Each structure stands twice: as C-alpha cells, then as structure tokens.
Image (spheres, coloured by chain):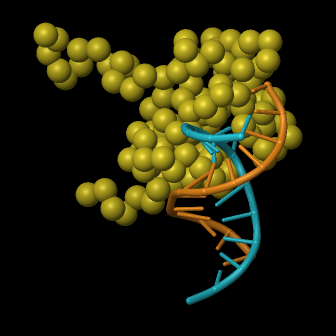
Chain colours: A yellow, B cyan, C orange
Amino acid sequence: MEAPTSVYARIFTVIAMIPEGRVATYGQIAALAGIGRRARQVGYALASLPDGHEVPWHRVINAKGEISIRARTDGHETQRTLLEDEGVTFDVAGRVELSRFRWQPGFEVPAAGEAAS
DNA sequence: AAACTGACTAATA
DNA sequence: CTATTAGCCAGTT
C-alpha cells in the first residue's frame, strides 16, 4: 500500500511530521522516508515544491546545520526567520546547533500507543 | 526516450 | 578550516 506515492510525496509527509522547534537534515528525512541515502532527492523535492504547499520546508536543513537553500534569494532569509520564530537559535556562523535541535524520530511520542516499560 | 538539472552526504587530502 | 571526488536518483524538458 505504499506504492502510488511518489518519492517526493513521501518526503513531504516526513517533513510534515517534524515537530516545532525542531529541525531535520536532508539525509535524515531521506532515511525516514525510506529512501536511504538519497538526501539529494529530498532537496530536489523541495525545490520542486508547488505553490501553496503545507510543508514546513523551513525545518529542513543540511547536515552542517546550515541552510542550504539556493533557490529563492529571500528563501534562506525566510527560513531562518521561521526557525527563529519557532524557538530555534542560530550560532554566529548562522548555523543551527544540531546537537540540540535535531529532531529525533520516535522521541516525539513518548508512551503513545505503546505502553511504557 | 535521452539529456539535463539539482534545497545533499561522506570520505579523503 | 577548504577543496576535491564520488555516489545518488526522480522529475522536467
């Protein structure tokens, strides 16, 4: 039952489940989407995002914690603003502290549907 | 159908 | 730290 969805759609779905104040790397999203190491495709998917998408693309950054966006000139500026608005902070180099803001899948739902211990 | 494109990652030097 | 090399693949033209 997971065939009709194209890779892009899966990526959007994964990104859509990133909690606020959290960021994820392309490689991480790729892995969560079930496409292994195709981190590039994740980025390309966002690059092809249509207008009016409901995907928090701004929560997606590269492995260095930097904003990789190369598309819209104001894109990377907007992304930073959006993240800061969610509580994400940037260091002097304009990078996010992945050690602190990296989204950890499975950690978003502690004891939900699965009994603790 | 073939060529072109591109929001990446990791390893090595 | 920067530069370079290599791997990766779906969508668009």
Front residue of A41 and A22: A41
Position in image of residue B7 (x %, y %): 69, 46
In the rendered view, would you say A81 is above or below B12? above
Q: Quadrant of the N terminus of chain A?
A: bottom left
Front residue of A58 and C3: C3
Q: Horizontal placement of A76 versus A6: left or right? A: right
Position in image of residue A54 (x %, y %): 57, 40
- Residue drawn at x 65%, y 28% as measured from the top left: A64
The image quadrant that residue A6 belongs to is: bottom left
Q: Horizontal placement of A45 versus A107: left or right? A: right
Position in image of residue C5 (x %, y %): 69, 54
In the rendered view, would you say B3 is above or below A101? below
- Residue A69 can be seen, yes or no: yes
Q: Quadrant of the C terminus of chain A?
A: top left
Position in image of residue A113 (x %, y %): 19, 23
The image quadrant that residue B4 belongs to is: bottom right
- Residue drawn at x 55%, y 15% as measured from the top left: A99
Front residue of B9 and B5: B9
- Residue drawn at x 41%, y 39% as measured from the top left: A32
In the rendered view, would you say A110 is above or below A2? above
In the rendered view, would you say A44 is above or below A88? below
- Residue A49 can be seen, yes or no: no
- Residue drawn at x 53%, y 21% as measured from the top left: A102
Count of marks overlaid on the render: 0
Q: Horizontal placement of A97 versus B3: left or right? A: left
